[in-house]
Image: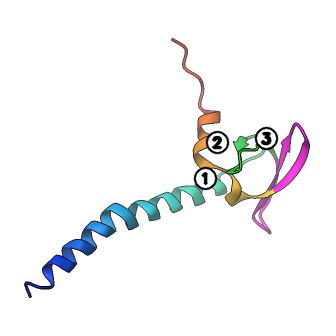
Amino acid sequence: MESILPFVAMFAVVYFFMIAPQMKRAKQEKKFAADLKRGDKVITKSGLHGKVVDLNDKDNSCVIETLAGKIKFERSAISMEMSKKLNTPATTK
C-alpha cells in the first residue's frame, strides 16, 4: 500500500497541472471556433490578419478577407488568443 501512494500522488500532480488545463483549453478553443460569426476580425495561427466573410458548417471552414483577397481556412487554424486581443476595445488613459 505504501509503495502505491507515490504513484497516485504523481498521477494527481500530472493530472491537475497538465491534463486538466489542456482539456479546458481545448474546450475553450472549440467554443471559440463555434462562436465565430461574419464580420469578426481574426488572426490565423500563421499570423494572417483578416475579417470573416463566410462560414461553412459542412466542412468546418471559413472564408477570410484580407488585403490580398479572400482565403478559405479551417476554423481550427484561427488563433483564439490573438483574435481576442484584436477584438478587445483599447483602453485610453
Q: Which quadrant of the view contains residue 66?
A: top right
Real-space Cα separation, disc 2 to disc 3, in angstroms: 10 Å
- What residue lies at 40% left-to-right and 60% top-to-bottom? 21
**Residue 91 to residue 8: above or below:** above
Q: Which residue lies furthest to the top in this view?
A: 93
Amino acid at the residue labelled 3: Lys
Main structural element of the magenta stretch: helix, strand or loop? strand
- Packing grade of label 2 (10 A; few <14, some 14-19, many >=20) is some
Amino acid at the residue labelled 2: Ser
The answer to whether marks 2 and 1 mark residues whose Cβ atoms lie closer than 8 Å is yes
User: Which mark identifies residue 32?
Assistant: 1
Q: Which residue lies furthest to the bottom in this view?
A: 1
Of the residues under marks 2 and 3, which one precedes in the sequence? Answer: 3
Q: Residue beneath label 3, please? A: 51
* Image coords of residue 4 (percent x, y): 15, 84
- What residue lies at 70% left-to-right and 43% top-to-bottom? 43
Q: Residue furthest left?
A: 2
Of the residues under marks 3 and 1, which one precedes in the sequence? Answer: 1
**Numbered disc 3: secondary structure:** strand
The answer to whether marks 3 and 1 mark residues whose Cβ atoms lie closer than 8 Å is no
Task: Please state the extent of the stretch shown in magenta in the rendering.
Answer: 53-72
Label 2 or label 1, whichever lies nearer to me, is: 2
- Packing grade of label 3 (10 A; few <14, some 14-19, many >=20) is some
Q: Residue beneath label 2, please? A: 83
Between 14 and 72, the residue placed more toward the observer is 14
Q: Which quadrant of the view contains residue 22?
A: bottom left
